[in-house]
Image (cartoon, grey):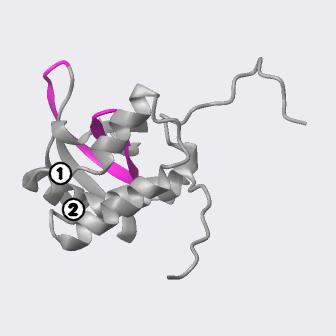
């Protein structure tokens, strides 16, 4: 068996891998890929409830309709195209928004699309289960660096002593 070199994946790498897994379905490749993603998380403290829940969400296949929307979002990220989404927000309002997709991520038990919302003129995170439809457009999206827009990363605390 070949030796495997392990290193920690960046938040952007994990987001890209997770999005790639999101629409694989439940076939044999997806099972192997999800097992690989679990191995990537071996260095994390799984006693942390948020991390444990996030790992479970990452490694569970999405429902078919949500996976279809994830595929459309992934294609738009790759092609750097704007998407039009029908979104049902937490207050129950339905809106149609043009979004420049940046990345997708999982936090706790939910998948999110992170993107530049042209309606709000700022970065927003849209829960996948609240996105009712995704329509690709031919409008080019600006390049956005994913690492600037990952809202759920743990930040170093200012009062922690620095490692020498």
Which quarter of the rendering shows the C terminus?
top right
Q: Position of residue 56 (x, y in %)?
A: 30, 42
Residue 93, label in figure: none
The segment highlighted magenta reads: 91-111
Q: Main secondary structure of the magenta part?
A: strand
Sequence-first tag of 1 and 2: 2
* Other-residue count near label 2 (Cα within 10 Å), few / some / many at <14 / 14–19 / ≥20: many
Q: Is residue 118 or residue 102 the one in the foreground?
A: 102
- Residue 147 lies in the magenta stretch: no
Residue designated by label 1? 62
Helix or strand or loop: what does disc 1 sit on? loop
Write the residue at 33% across / 58% down: 19
**In the displayed structure, would residue 26 be above or below residue 91?**
below
Q: CA distance from mark 1 to mark 2?
A: 7 Å
Q: Is residue 120 visible?
A: no
* Left or right for 11, reference 84: right
Q: Is residue 10 above or below residue 6?
A: above
* Image coordinates for residue 81, horizontal then vertical, percent: 34, 64
Q: Compared with residue 117, is residue 136 higher up or lower down, i.e. above or below? A: below
Label 2 SS: loop
Q: Which residue is mark 2?
A: 23
Which of the two residues, 123 or 32, is positioned nearer the viewer here? 32
Residue most extreme to the front: 1
Say whether residue 106 is visible.
yes
Q: Residue visible at 34% across and 60% down? A: 35
Q: x, y percentage for residue 50?
A: 40, 29
Quarter location, residue 121: top left
Position of residue 21 measured from the top left corner of the image (x, y, whole percent): 30, 61
What residue occupies the far right of the structure in this picture? 164
Q: Residue 10, relative to residue 121: is it above or below?
A: below
């Amino acid at each position: 068996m070949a030796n495997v070199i392990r290193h920690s994946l960046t938040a952007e790498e994990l987001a890209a891998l997770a999005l790639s897994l999101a629409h694989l379905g439940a076939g044999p490749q997806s099972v192997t890929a999800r097992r690989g993603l679990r191995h990537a998380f071996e260095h994390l403290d799984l006693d942390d409830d948020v991390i444990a829940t996030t790992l479970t969400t990452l490694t569970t296949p999405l429902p078919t309709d949500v996976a279809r929307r994830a595929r459309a979002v992934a294609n738009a990220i790759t092609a750097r195209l704007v998407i039009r989404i029908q979104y049902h927000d937490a207050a129950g309002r339905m809106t149609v928004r043009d979004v420049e997709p940046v990345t997708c991520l999982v936090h706790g038990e939910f998948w999110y699309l992170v993107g530049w919302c042209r309606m709000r003129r700022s970065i927003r995170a849209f829960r996948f289960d609240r996105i009712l439809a995704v329509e690709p457009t031919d409008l080019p999206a600006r390049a956005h660096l994913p690492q600037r827009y990952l809202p759920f990363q743990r930040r170093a605390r200012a009062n922690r002593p620095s490692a020498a």
